[in-house]
Amino acid sequence: MRAFYAVGFHGTTVDAILETSEVPKGSFYHHFGSKEAFARAVLEQYMAFQLDLMGTWADRDDLTTPEKVEGYFDELVSNFVRSGFERACLAGKFSTELAASSDAFRIELNAGFARWKAGLAAMLSAGQENGDIRSDLPAAELATTVLVLLQGGFVLALSDHDDRSLESVRSTLATVLSPPRKRRV
C-alpha cells in the first residue's frame, strides 16, 4: 500500500511489491494474476478500513452526529499529517490515476465510494432523526457533499503540505451539516 501512496499505481512495479512483501513472483501472479488485480485488492482493504473507522465513530453514543463526523474527519487528518502529508486517500489517488483508463478499476472505485457515501448517509440520516443534522436536504446529498469536501481538502493539502485547507473543510462541515437557525422576527 505504501508504494501506491508514494509513487502511484503506474510508478509501482511488481518487483517493488515483491521486494517489500518477500513473496515469490510465481505466488504473486498465482494469487492475483496481475498488478491491477493486486491494486484492486489493496483498494478493497483500504475501503474496508475507511468503513470500519467511520463505523467506529458512528457507533459512539456519547457524541452528537456532528461530533461523530468531525471526530472521523479529525482522525483522517491526524493520520495524514503523521504520514508527512503523503498518505491522504488511496481511493482518491487511484481515481485520479486509473478511473479514466481502466473500466474495471473505475467500477471498483465507484462501488467503494458508493459504500462510503452510504455509510455517511446512514450516520447523517440518524442525525436528522435526532435533530442535530439539517433535514432540509436528503442525507444522501449531504453525504456526497461531505465526501467531496474530504476529497478536495486532501487534494489541496497534498499539494501544499499544509493543513489549513483541512481546517477549512472542518469548519465548513459544521456549517453544511447544522440545522438552519430560525430567524428572529
Image: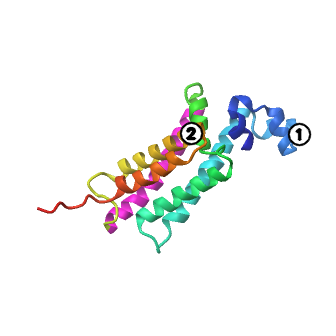
> In the image, what residue type sits under mark 1?
Pro
Inspect the magenta stretch and tell me whether residue 117 lies in it: yes
Q: In this view, does 40 lie above or below 69?
A: above
Q: In this rendering, does residue 38 appear at all?
A: no
**Residue 168 located left or right of residue 49:** left
**Residue 157 position (above or below residue 121):** above
How much space separates mark 1 and mark 2, taking CA atoms? 30 Å
The quadrant in which the C terminus is found is bottom left
Q: Specify the segment rendered in magenta.
A: 105-130
- Label 1 packing within 10 angstroms: few (<14), some (14-19), many (20+): few
Mark 1 sits on what residue? 24
User: Circle 2 is placed at which residue position?
Assistant: 92
Tell me residue 167's x, y (percent): 49, 51
Residue situated furthest left in the rendering = 185
| Percent coordinates x, y for residue 60 in the rendering | 50, 70
Q: Is mark 1 on a helix, strand or loop?
A: loop
